[in-house]
Amino acid sequence: MRFLSTHRRHPLAGYAVLLFGLLLAGALYYAFSPSSADAQDSASDTTKIDEGRQLFLVGCASCHGMNAEGVTTKSGGNFGPSLIGVGAAAVDFQVGTGRMPMAQTAPQAPRKKVEYDEDEIDALATYVASLGPGPAVPDEEYTDVSDLSQEELTRGGEFFRTNCTACHNSVGAGGALPSGRYAPTLAGVDEKHIYEAMQTGPQQMPVFNDEVITPEDKRAIIGYIKSVQSQPQGGFGGGGVGPVADGMFAWIIGIGGLVLVAIWLAAQGARVKKKRS
């Protein structure tokens, strides 16, 4: 303190204080400024958003609008709904399963060949996600079902039978719905896309967000679906469409076969009596 008091009127004292302030400001900025990795990630996201917008303008804007606000028809319908707030998961599902771009107007967009590669799908999803908050593409920890326990698979089966079998059938084979729509088969569908369908509720499917079914329970449902599809369903499953089909085959083949045998036996008995007479 005595040293500072003695030299405070020194001609260089002001410069020393200024230098000390600059050093202190630099140290504080270094300590609290964003890391270079964060800056790089931000620049990368900006580039990806720009790429996604260019892809969107070419392949999606004719139905969904130049700014993804949707295109309304004169009758009050729309060529394509607004995508603001649908999130990256909806785009990843619709484009990643080939449902979008839609080939032609129909009650429901069918699954078909995918038109974009993974990087382009990621860019489109990033662009749409930047327009408004919505469900994100799920982390791999919720779509990897290789290490689920039997208890988790059982819980997944309970959720599936309660919430999904009315439309998708007991083994996920799908089924018809009103107005020309249908619940698609779940056979061969990627785990990530099953999760995204539950999260976003595409077309007539209800939304099962994390408040309705937790990510852990969604993972259990996916595990159950995959485990059921890898196992035979009874003897002759009739395409795996459930117990109604099994009963139909039993009546047609079983009872029908018995009726034919009975007719044959009756005919044989009539011929024997005729020869004897």
Image (tube, grey):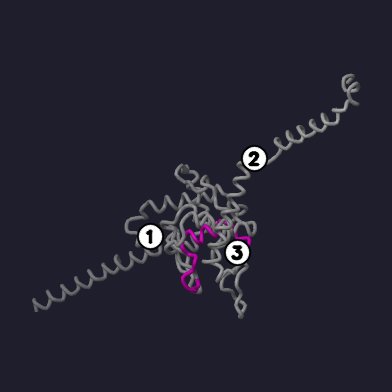
Going 46% across and 42% down the picture, which residue do you hit? 147
Q: CA distance from mark 2 to mark 3?
A: 33 Å
Where is the N terminus found, in terms of image quarters? Answer: top right
Note whether 69 is above or below 5 in the view shown. below
Q: Position of residue 42 (x, y in %)?
A: 62, 48
Q: Report if residue 89 lies within the magenta region.
A: yes
Q: Tell which of 15 and 226 is nearer to you.
A: 15
Three-letter amino acid code at the position of disc 3:
Leu
- State left or right for residue 43 relative to residue 181: right
- State left or right for residue 42 relative to residue 107: right
Q: Which residue is mark 3?
A: 83
What secondary structure is found at the residue carrying circle 2? loop
Mark 2 surroundings: few (<14), some (14-19) or many (≥20) residues within 10 A: few
Q: Which residue is mark 1?
A: 240
Q: Report if residue 160 lies within the magenta region.
A: no
Which segment is the magenta one?
84-107
- In the image, farthest residue toward the front: 11
Which comes sooner in the sequence, label 3 or label 1?
3
Quadrant in the rendering for residue 269? bottom left
Going 32% across and 56% down the picture, which residue do you hit? 235
Mark 1 surroundings: few (<14), some (14-19) or many (≥20) residues within 10 A: some
What secondary structure is found at the residue carrying circle 3? loop
Q: Position of residue 174 (x, y in %)?
A: 44, 63
Going 9% across and 79% down the picture, which residue do you hit? 277
Q: Which residue is mark 2?
A: 35
Q: Tell which of 139 and 56 is nearer to you.
A: 56
Three-letter amino acid code at the position of disc 1:
Gly
Three-letter amino acid code at the position of disc 2:
Ser
